[in-house]
Amino acid sequence: MPAKLRVLFLCSAFNGLTQSVWTRWAGRFGQSRLKVGLDVPEILAFAPDLVLCPYLLERLPPAVFEACPCLVLHPGPHGLGGPSSLQWAVLAGRTGWAVSCFEARKHWDQGPLWAELPLELQPGSVIELYRRQVVPLAVPLFEAALERLFSGAPPLERGPFLYQKKITPQDLRFDWQETGPQILAKIRAGDSTPGTLGPIQGQTFGLFKAQPRELQGPPGEVLGFEGSGVLVGTGTHGLLIERLMPQGGMKLKAKTALLGSH
């Protein structure tokens, strides 16, 4: 890999994923720059030889990806594209998974594939899976992609492709009569964005940090409290919900949201 490259690290947020890649790779090139947010004139003014996108929510315009290779981390396998692939995986209860690195092109997630690493999704919310499973693979994924790109080897072969739309609160709507696993999957798929709405004691909240519990009670009824969380009945068994967000408000410990600070 050429040592004197001008490399732009382009991201939508300087989150844990971006930090891990920036910390590991920034010092390995001739000149590195971090840019949060898509500013095309500023990107072109830097005149990078390579753009690395560990966490990018916006679509890159042709003016950028036609100027130099732009490698994008996708938190899913190459055959399942779109901005919410991991959320859809959690909602469907998938376990076999992968993270992939492709080169930006006109169509979302359909550029040349330079690397892909398999993983088995563990039970948890989207944000937990990002932190525990996607972030640790970001550095080795880019390492494999860059090694292949600069070795002169062709991109990896791509198979069938399915674009999945951005997940919405409507996709996560549920009825407390549904089974505990069904509701749990919807809450975990919406944690932390876009959030899963549900009624508790006549008020609609965003529900976060849910865990299964082996207890039974009327669906939708508060069955008690566990620590700072609330226990709620479903069509099969109970759920512990640790955080609630009133509409227009901020996330609170569930017990505080329902009972106040006293």
Image: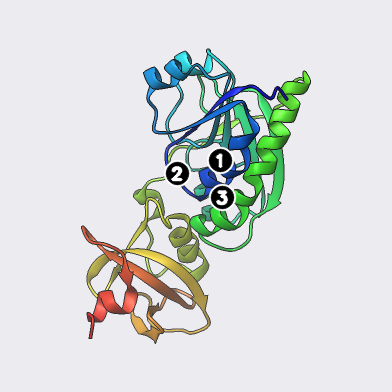
- Which residue is tagged 3? 89
Q: Where residue 149 sits: x, y (%)? A: 71, 23
CA distance for labels 1 and 3? 27 Å
Q: Closest to the observer: 248 or 85?
A: 248
| Mark 1 and mark 2 residues within 8 Å of each other at the beta carbon | yes
- Which residue is tagged 1? 22
Q: Amino acid at mark 2?
A: Phe
Q: Helix, strand, or loop for circle 3?
A: helix
The quadrant in which the C terminus is found is bottom left
Q: Please give the label number shown on residue 14.
A: 2
User: Mark 3: few, some, or many residues within 10 Å (few <14, many ≥20)?
Assistant: some
In the image, what residue occupies the spot 42% across and 42% down?
A: 13
* Dot in front, 1 or 3: 1
Q: Where residue 43 sits: x, y (%)? A: 44, 21
Q: Helix, strand, or loop for circle 2?
A: loop
The quadrant in which the N terminus is found is top right
CA distance for labels 1 and 2? 9 Å
